[in-house]
Image (tube, grey):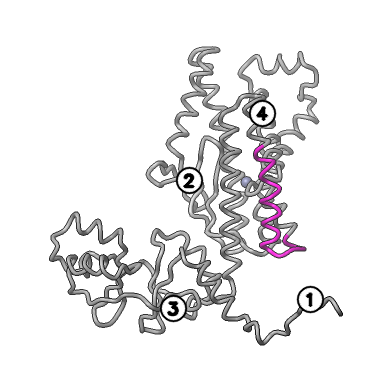
Amino acid sequence: MGRAWSIPLFRVFGIRLEMHITFILILAYAAWMGSGHDGARGAAWSVLLVALLFVCVVLHELGHSLTARLYGIPTHRILLLPIGGMAQLAEMPREPWREFFITAAGPAVNVVIVLLIGVPLWTAGLVPTTEQEVLAVFQDYTPLALALTLLVYNVIMAGFNLIPVFPMDGGRIFRSLLAMRLSYLHATRVAAWVAKPLAAAGALYALLGPGHILLALLFAFIYIAGDMEYRMVERQERFRDQVIGDLTARFVRTVPGHLSIDDALWLMQHEQPREIVVHNGGGPVRILTPGDLRRAARERPRSTPLEAVAPQPSIHLQAGWPFGVLSKELARRKEDRFAVYNGSDFLGILRCDDLERAAAWERLRATPPETERPRRRWMPWG
Ligand code: ZN
């Protein structure tokens, strides 16, 4: 969901509200459907209904965002997509109760709207009960029809979001409840595992039943998002207790910054390092990946010094920093390897692709050799 495809609207409670460009298609579609019924009046009514629906969506997302703010977690933006809203929180807290309240606050907003509209209408006897009454209400563009439509929207929104398909609200609530008893990783695994068949069934139902392509896409999207989030949690939890230094490759090829692209090409051909670390005597290093070098060789004169073409890493890591705290932040960055320092001394490279391998060696190092362990032998004579 690139930033280029979203249009900034305005700020609510200091949170940037953005509309994805495809959202215009939904408005256009609503206007077109409405005009088919009743010309300009119908089109205006349809657009009004869609706009109100998305006001409710924004209120739902604000429920999440403002509760998160109580815990000191900021929201980067609220994005309106044709498939609904998305509040991009800086992080989802690991504490089950916090996740529970932040998540439950969204559907709770819809429930409050239902009560605010439903109770006065009900006490005034305005809620239609028979089919004829329903048809009569929706025949005309009246405030009552509008209020009832809003009521239905919010009932559907609360109900739909509470389906326990991780990472939808219901799935997150489910995960947080599980995490009160199980480990965070185990709870996520169960929630993600339960979500898959539900999401698949939802997509199938949407395709075979009501035929809503958009709904099927939404379930497909949720299926993938749940899997991705589970993998992220798995990685984060596995390396949680390790420090960056344990996962850092120390034997890396370093060269002075005045070497040229030509020299680096020779080096790549004959030594085939995973990357070339470019230093300038002291201070932070630059990392030149094979991809960077190929690009530089195509675009720049071969005599260009490496310090002019190797990119500066966006973050300098310290060997003693815990990996668990940083893993999310690193996953967000576009590079896949980072320079690691011991104080101001360069130590080595943290390669995200190699984390599993580094951790496997770490485990093996921590295991005593076979000879130190008592051998268990199968002896038929007892
Ligand atoms: Zn929600």
Query: From which residue to which does the magenta span run?
Result: 179-200
Label 1 CA crowd tier, 10 Å (few <14, some 14–19, many 20+)? few
**In the image, residue 98 lies at what x, y percent?**
67, 61
Q: CA distance from mark 2 to mark 3?
A: 36 Å
Would you say the residues marked 2 and 3 are in contact, meaning their CB atoms lie under 8 Å apart? no
**In the image, residue 10 lies at what x, y percent?**
45, 45
Location of mark 2 (residue): 17
Q: Earlier in the sequence, mark 2 or mark 3?
A: 2
Label 3 CA crowd tier, 10 Å (few <14, some 14–19, many 20+)? some
Q: Name the magenta segment's main secondary structure.
A: helix
Q: CA distance from mark 4 to mark 1?
A: 77 Å
Mark 4: amino acid: Ala
Label 4 CA crowd tier, 10 Å (few <14, some 14–19, many 20+)? some
- Rendered position, 69 above or below 222: below
Disc 1 residue lies near ligand 1 with CB under 8 A: no
Label 2 CA crowd tier, 10 Å (few <14, some 14–19, many 20+)? many
Q: Earlier in the sequence, mark 3 or mark 4?
A: 4
Mark 3: amino acid: Gln
Q: Nearer the viewer, mark 4 or mark 1?
A: 1
Would you say the residues marked 1 and 3 are in contact, meaning their CB atoms lie under 8 Å apart? no
Q: CA distance from mark 1 to mark 2?
A: 68 Å
Q: Secondary structure at mark 3?
A: strand
Q: Earlier in the sequence, mark 2 or mark 4?
A: 2
Q: Earlier in the sequence, mark 1 or mark 3?
A: 3
In the image, 137: left or right of 333? right
Tell whether position 330 is magenta: no
Location of mark 1 (residue): 378
